[in-house]
Amino acid sequence: MSGYGSVARYYDAEYDGFRQDVDFVLERLRAERVRGPLLEPGCGTGRMAAPLAAAGYRVCGFDLAEAMLRRARRRRDGLPPEARLRLRFSRQDMADFRYRQRFGAVVLAFSTLNLLPDAADRRRCLQRIADHLEPGGLLLADLPNLEAPGAAGPRRHRTSFRLPGSGHLVTKTVEERDERGGSAVAVRYTYSARRWLDDALVDELEVDFSLARIGRREIEGMLTEVGLDPESIWGDYLGRPFAARSARMILEARRPR
C-alpha cells in the first residue's frame, strides 16, 4: 500500500481537463478584488496554483509529498516566463508551515483540509493560515460535503481515463468506508493501467488514506476560534447556496481588518 502522494503520476492525467474549481476561485478572487499574493497549502501537482499564476497572481504553494512537487515544478516550467516568475513551491507541512510574508488570500483547494484526519492538526493548519493572512485577507476552503445523504456507509465506484503519451487506459476503483466512529472515511484507490494495443496490464497501484468528515458546524467553529470570520458558503462551483444535499461545502472567511 502507498500514501496519497504516490498517486502523482495518475492525478494529473485524471484531472487534466477539470477546471470548475479553478474558475470558481478566480471568480471569487476577482469579485473580492484580491490582488495577492496568494498561498495554496497542499498544492499537490500545481493544478490550481499554475493557472492562478498564469492569471497574473503571485502564488506560493507547498506540499509535503516530493512526488507531487516534482510534477508541480514541471507544470511551472510550461508556463510563460513572466508567469513562472510569479510561482514558487516549497516542501512544508500543512500543520506547521512558515513564510516571512503575509498573503491577500489563501486557497485550500479540492478537499485538501480533509487530508488532515486529526482535528488538532486541522486547527493548527487554520491557525497558521490566519497568522499568514493580511488584515482583511480571504480564505477560500473547498471541502466535500461528507454529511450529505448517502455519504455514510461503504461505497464503491469506478472511473477511467487515459494516460497522455502512452494512451494506456487506467481504471480507478474507489472504495470508501467509515472509520473512527464515523469521524473519518477510509479511502482506497486502486489504479490499473492497461496497454491500449493488447489490453495487457502494465501497472497497478493501491493507495490508502483517510478523509476527515468535517461538518459545517465544526469548520465554522474552528474558523472563529482561530480569529477568522466566516462570511459565505456555497454548495458547488456554480455558486449555488449550500444545502444538506450539496456535493461540496465551499467556505469563504476573512481575517478582520
Image: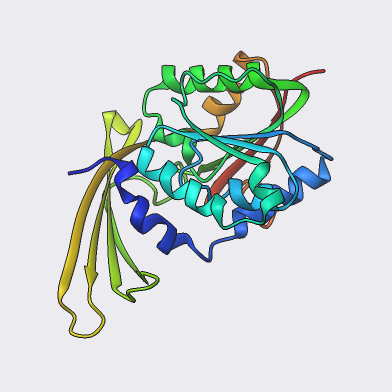
Horizontal side of 28 relative to 193 (left or right) equals right
Q: Position of residue 165 (x, y in %)?
A: 38, 73
Q: Looking at this view, name the residue that lies furthest to the bottom.
A: 197
Image location (x, y in percent) of residue 11: 40, 55
State the residue at coordinates (40%, 35%).
115
Pinpoint residue 194: horizontal percent, then vertical percent.
22, 73
Q: How many numbered discs sit on the rendered protein?
A: 0
- Residue 157 drawn above or below residue 161: above
Q: Mark yes or no: residue 245 visible.
A: no
Residue drawn where x is 65% and y is 20% of the image? 132
Q: Is residue 52 left or right of residue 155?
A: right
**Of 16 and 145, which appears nearest the observer?**
16
From this view, report whether residue 197 is shown above or below residue 191: below
Residue beneath the point at 72% across and 33% down: 37
* Image position of 195 (left or right of 33): left
**As drawn, which residue projects farthest toward the front?**
81
Closest to the observer, 9 or 133: 9
Is 235 left or right of 73, judged from the image as shown? right
Quadrant showing the C terminus: top right
- In terms of depth relative to the viewer, which is nearer, 2 or 139? 2
Q: Coloured how?
A: rainbow
Residue 156: quadrant of the picture: bottom left
Q: Is residue 77 visible?
A: yes
Identify the residue shown where x is 61% and y is 15%: 226
Q: Quadrant of residue 32?
A: top right
1 in relation to 103, above or below: below
Residue 206, image x and y in percent? 20, 51
| Viewport quadrant of the N terminus | top left
